[in-house]
Image: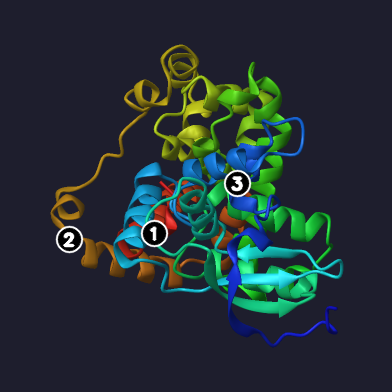
């Protein structure tokens, strides 16, 4: 009989066959959605293999984990299991490791795979489950891919109605970043998924293009040029915006009639070539990055308030877009992990 819900776990060796894989795991749901009925253990195993090792979106990483477990005769990091009110044991974190143990048992692989080390919680509530997932997979050592992160955050916000402040407390970062991820997921589902002829070709790696779309002035630029977000999704699907960081060039491309025509025919890379290049003086061309950064900082601090306010009021304007491009380039230089590319 299960005890009252507790946030205190006990470390045990639990029979592998008694533990259920978590089919609601955000990292593999995008693969399991292709199955109309309840997925079989084999289908869950295939989904886990496709998604890689607890966060690395590659079958290579999955194979590395498999070989590491075989070599060491087991796992070092315990999985996390919740005993639910009906007595079922569900794996909350570590589904890939559990699936490998189950597979080793099924295939009679040499070794002791009947018991797996686990932190066992009694009737863990949803808030605790969310906290563990967010800490392990959003800011921990085994992050989910960006699409899966955004999908999970979207569920927490729109279905469980968690306030942004609580979500940010769980996963760290800034509220602006969380809002961008949630909106990017919503846009991709609303505008990109419907245009895919076969749901099997839904490519979640295109997600970073929809993250770029959330930058200031991007949606406004698309609308002012007479296009819709469905058109944007078609450009992503048709690789008009390739690589995906070309999305940030859209405002300048769409404002230039010649560049826009080339973009619609041949894509953003070709369109960028016809945009006017700034006529920089020799002094600017010869300055190093540190000098240029100091110069732009001084220029911003010395900028009259009306001029600064005008830039803020026109996020799709050329100056605002140039500043955003510079910001993205500088951020990528200092912290490449934030680019999502």
Between 301 and 288, the one nearer to me in the picture: 288
The residue beneath circle 3 is: 28
The residue beneath circle 2 is: 288
Quadrant hosting residue 225? top right
State which tag comes first along the sequence, 3 or 2: 3
Between 282 and 290, the one nearer to me in the picture: 290
State which tag comes first along the sequence, 1 or 2: 2
Which marked residue is nearer to the observer: mark 3 or mark 1?
3
Q: Residue at x 70, y 63 (%)?
A: 90
Q: Residues within 10 Å of mark 2 (few under 14, many from 20)?
A: few
The residue beneath circle 1 is: 337
Q: Tell whether 284 sits left or right of 109.
A: left
Which marked residue is nearer to the observer: mark 3 or mark 2?
3
In the rendering, at what x and y percent does residue 157 appear? Answer: 77, 59
Is residue 27 visible from the viewing direction of this image? yes
In the rendering, at what x and y percent does residue 150 appear? Answer: 63, 52
The quadrant in which the N terminus is found is bottom right
* Secondary element type, mark 2: loop
Q: Residues within 10 Å of mark 3 (few under 14, many from 20)?
A: many
């Amino acid at each position: 009989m299960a005890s009252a819900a507790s946030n205190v776990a006990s470390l045990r060796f639990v029979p592998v066959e008694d533990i259920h894989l978590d089919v609601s795991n955000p990292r593999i749901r995008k693969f399991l959605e292709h199955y109309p009925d309840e997925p079989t253990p084999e289908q869950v195993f295939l989904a886990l293999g496709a998604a890689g090792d607890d966060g690395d979106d590659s079958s290579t990483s999955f194979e590395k984990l498999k070989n590491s477990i075989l070599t060491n005769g087991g796992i070092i990091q315990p999985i996390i299991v919740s005993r639910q009110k009906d007595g079922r044991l569900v794996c909350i974190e570590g589904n890939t490791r559990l699936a490998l143990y189950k597979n080793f048992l099924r295939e009679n692989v040499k070794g002791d795979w009947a018991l797996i080390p686990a932190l066992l919680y009694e009737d863990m509530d949803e808030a605790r489950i969310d906290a563990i997932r967010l800490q392990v997979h959003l800011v921990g050592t085994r992050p989910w891919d960006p699409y899966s992160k955004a999908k999970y955050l979207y569920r927490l916000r729109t279905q469980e109605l968690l306030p942004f402040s609580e979500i940010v407390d769980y996963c760290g970062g800034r509220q602006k970043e969380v809002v961008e991820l949630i909106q990017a997921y919503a846009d991709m589902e609303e505008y990109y998924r419907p245009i895919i002829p076969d749901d099997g070709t839904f490519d979640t790696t295109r997600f970073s293009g929809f993250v770029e779309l959330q930058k200031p002035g991007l949606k406004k630029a698309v609308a002012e040029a007479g296009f819709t977000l469905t058109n944007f999704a078609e450009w992503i699907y048709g690789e008009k915006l390739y690589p995906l960081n070309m999305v940030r060039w859209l405002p300048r491309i769409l404002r230039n009639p010649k560049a826009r025509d080339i973009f619609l025919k041949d894509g953003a890379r070709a369109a960028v070539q016809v945009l006017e290049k700034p006529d920089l003086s020799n002094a600017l061309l010869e300055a190093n990055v540190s000098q240029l950064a100091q110069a732009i900082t001084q220029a911003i601090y010395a900028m009259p308030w009306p001029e600064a306010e005008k830039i803020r009021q026109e996020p799709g304007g050329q100056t605002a877009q140039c500043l955003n491009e510079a910001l993205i380039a500088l951020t990528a230089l200092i912290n490449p992990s934030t680019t999502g590319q």
